[in-house]
Image (tube, grey):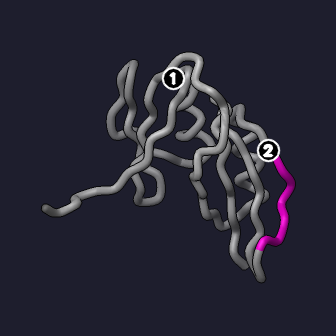
Amino acid sequence: MTVTETFFSIEVEDMQRATAFYVTALGASVLFASAGWSSLHIAGVRLGLALNPGHPAGRTGLHFAVDDLAAARTAIEAAGGQILAPALEVAPGVIAAEAADTEGNAFSLTQSA
């Protein structure tokens, strides 16, 4: 047996809104889209969006490393997401901020010096 791919998925309440957020805010490309499941590609990783109306908002465990944290924060807010916590230096030369998508899914943004 060989593992051929690893990918992550998160639940969303509104598929079109969530897909638009990841495309607009983080530059995702859409590999497949349907009413119940969409598959996106972001920086070499596949992210699945699974429709689940009424899903609870919360931490996803997703981390997005970016080259410009300030620009990423601006793009997230412009696309309807939220910045949940200010940028902090979490390790020498590493700045991180917490954000959430339009569905309440929280994730981390990091920038290395």
Q: Position of residue 41 (x, y in %)?
A: 41, 48
Residues packed near mark 2 inside 10 Å, few (<14), some (14 to 19) or many (20 plus): some
| Residue underneath mark 2 | 83
- State which region is magenta: 84-90
Give the left or right position of residue 57, taking residue 1 as reference: right
Give the residue type that dot 2 points to: Ile
Side (left or right) of 59 relative to 94: left
Residue for badge 1: 16
Instruction: Describe the element under mark 2 as helix, strand or loop.
Output: strand
Q: Position of residue 18 (x, y in %)?
A: 56, 30
Q: State left or right for residue 9 relative to residue 101.
A: left
The three-letter amino acid code for the residue at tag 1 is Gln
Indicate whether residue 87 is drawn in magenta.
yes
- What label does residue 80 carry, if any? none
Seen at 58% across and 24% down, the residue is: 55
Quadrant that contains the C terminus: bottom right
* Label 1 Cα neighbours within 10 Å, binned few <14 / some 14-19 / many ≥20: few
Element at badge 1? helix
Discs 1/2, front: 2
Q: Position of residue 82 (x, y in %)?
A: 77, 38
Q: Residue at coordinates 73% horizontally, 46% vertically from top-left?
A: 99
Q: Residue at x 55, y 20 (%)?
A: 14
Sequence order check, earlier mark of 1 and 2: 1
- Numbered disc total: 2
Residue 27 placement (x, y as % from top left): 54, 48
